Image (tube, rainbow, N blue to C red):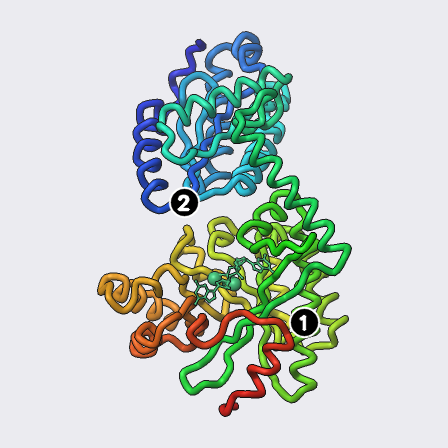
């Protein structure tokens, strides 16, 4: 092991393990994922030998600062000793942690000046996601092993624990299932197996605030729920194509409603992968033009986790959408990690309180307090506040009392196909 002891200011190995134990308990109680990345600089011994420990320290410090700045707000960085770092990332799923690892790789690769020399460092990164009931130390060990595997394969690469050459049986089963879903998604895209269902969002006077478009996928006579196919689509990048499809379909539906005499917003779900793509604005404009629909009839629903880290591309896409009149709603609010400091910079017009809170009403007084506080927050920021997942009359009344602007849920209507929606609209007495 090398010296390099003058690099301080980061959690050390013990601090890291304590944090993992704490967050593993948090992951267990909330059901949220917990990811760890083990980052090890490649060829660091050479740097130490060529530039001495002082030079080595400089490299470690710069790398540590680059990584820390990059993961800020999403993960906690610890130094495990030598040139090894661990990032603990609560709440990140496989796709998000993969993205984070690539971001870390990119900041590490930026040129580094050491005396007259310009270095281009690289790193090996191992990733693990805490398994149900897994011992926190075994979890960190798996992360380390994944990093060692990245080194064994020649360094400068990212390896997921479980993707090593001999994966556990569970790994194989999951990979197979995902592959099957991916195939079904392709089939659905090509054979018209994708559809949108629509669920109305209603104000207290019974008028319609918006209609949310929810994707449905059927292939080989089997219906796959979005909770299963959206994560696979996100992982494989297919979600970009699915997203373009739903933008166009949703926008066309808004136009048909308008032609039928109902000026009503259609809310379309957009995933993180779409929004980080610089071409998203083009896709959105394309859909608006093809559907010949006024942009103020379209709203994009963005999950809260998106706002943990708003890149320039995301900011531009959001600003472009707002500039042309498209509405933005923050979805599943209260469940993710939205940094409240970020919230004030997001040009959103709506806040959708997650179903998890509504489920606890009206019995749970503390949940009600949180709901009231979130409504107040939305108000202060000038947003319309919506409650999701309203199933009972008691929940509805509690929410109206608490001051929400509109509600969505099975109590009023389940998501339905376009024909059923038309019948539902026709059967209503109110505007
Ligand atoms: P979400 O955006 O939070 O959508 C609301 C989900 O809650 C829908 O599930 C809806 O059917 C369900 N829901 C509505 N009212 C109630 C209720 O009263 N009780 C209960 N228990 N559930 C209710 P769904 O359709 O299965 O969609 C699940 C998730 O999949 C969505 O959550 C959204 O995150 C994602 N999703 C759906 N369509 C798309 C899409 O076109 N693009 C993207 N990126 N994601 C989508
Ligand atoms: Ca939504
Ligand atoms: Ca939601």
Q: Which of 371 and 416 is in front in this view?
A: 416
Give neighbour class at mark 1: few <14, some 14-19, many 20+ (Cα, 10 Å). Answer: many
Report helix, strand or loop for mark 1. Answer: helix
For residue 233, side relative to residue 366 (left or right): right
Q: Nearer the viewer, residue 28 or 115?
A: 28
Q: x, y percentage for residue 179?
A: 65, 39
Which numbered circle lies on residue 32? Answer: 2
Q: In this view, does 198 lie above or below 276?
A: below
Q: x, y percentage for residue 385?
A: 42, 72
Q: x, y percentage for residue 332?
A: 45, 60
Q: Which of 101 and 132 is in front in this view?
A: 132
Is any atom of residue 383 visible in this view? no
What's the residue at 70%, 59% (across, down)?
A: 193
Q: In this view, does 268 lie above or below 10?
A: below
What's the residue at 44%, 16% (across, down)?
A: 82
Q: How far apart are marks 1 and 2 (CA)?
A: 33 Å
Q: x, y percentage for residue 311?
A: 56, 50
For residue 361, side relative to residue 169 (left or right): left
Q: Which of marks 1 and 2 is nearer the N terminus?
A: 2
For residue 224, side relative to residue 37 (left or right): right
Residue pushed farthest front?
Answer: 221
Q: Mark 1 points at which residue?
A: 251
Is any atom of residue 400 visible in this view? yes
What's the residue at 63%, 24% (across, down)?
A: 120
Give neighbour class at mark 2: few <14, some 14-19, many 20+ (Cα, 10 Å). Answer: some
What's the residue at 50%, 25% (across, down)?
A: 39
């Amino acid at each position: 092991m090398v010296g390099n002891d003058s690099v301080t200011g980061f959690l050390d190995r013990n601090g890291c393990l304590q944090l993992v134990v704490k967050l593993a308990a948090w992951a267990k109680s909330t059901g949220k994922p917990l990811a760890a990345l083990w980052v090890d600089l490649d060829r660091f011994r050479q740097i130490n030998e060529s530039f001495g420990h002082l030079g080595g320290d400089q490299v470690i410090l710069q790398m540590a600062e680059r990584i820390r700045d990059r993961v800020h707000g999403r993960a906690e960085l610890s130094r495990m000793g030598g040139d090894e770092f661990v990032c603990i990332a609560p709440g990140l799923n496989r796709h998000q942690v993969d993205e984070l690892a690539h971001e870390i790789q990119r900041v590490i690769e930026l040129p580094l000046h050491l005396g007259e020399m310009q270095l281009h460092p690289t790193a090996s990164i191992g990733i693990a996601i805490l398994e149900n009931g897994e011992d926190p130390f075994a979890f960190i060990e798996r992360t380390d092993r994944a990093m060692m595997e990245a080194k064994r394969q020649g360094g400068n690469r990212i390896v997921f624990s479980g993707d090593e050459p001999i994966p556990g049986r569970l790994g194989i089963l999951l990979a197979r299932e995902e592959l099957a879903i991916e195939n079904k998604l392709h089939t659905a895209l090509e054979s018209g197996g994708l559809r949108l269902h629509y669920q109305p969002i209603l104000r207290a006077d019974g008028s319609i605030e918006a209609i949310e478009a929810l994707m449905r996928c059927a292939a080989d006579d089997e219906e796959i729920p979005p909770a299963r196919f959206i994560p696979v689509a996100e992982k494989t990048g297919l979600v970009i194509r699915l997203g373009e499809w739903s933008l166009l379909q949703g926008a066309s539906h808004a136009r048909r409603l308008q032609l039928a005499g109902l000026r009503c917003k259609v809310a379309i779900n957009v995933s993180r992968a779409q929004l980080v793509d610089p071409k998203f604005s083009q896709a959105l404009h394309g859909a608006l033009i093809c559907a010949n629909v006024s942009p103020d009839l379209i709203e994009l629903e963005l999950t809260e986790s998106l706002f943990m880290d708003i890149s320039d591309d995301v900011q531009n896409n959001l600003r472009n959408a707002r500039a042309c009149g498209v509405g933005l709603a923050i979805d599943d609010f209260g469940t993710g990690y939205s940094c409240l400091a970020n919230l004030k910079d997001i040009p959103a017009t709506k806040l959708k309180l997650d179903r998890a809170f509504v489920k606890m009403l009206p019995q749970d007084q503390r949940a009600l307090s949180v709901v009231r506080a979130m409504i107040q927050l939305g108000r202060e920021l000038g947003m319309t506040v919506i409650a999701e997942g309203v199933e009972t009359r008691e929940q509805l009344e509690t929410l109206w009392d608490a001051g929400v602007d509109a509600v969505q849920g099975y109590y009023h209507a389940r998501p339905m196909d376009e024909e059923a929606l038309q019948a539902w609209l026709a059967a209503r007495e109110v505007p």
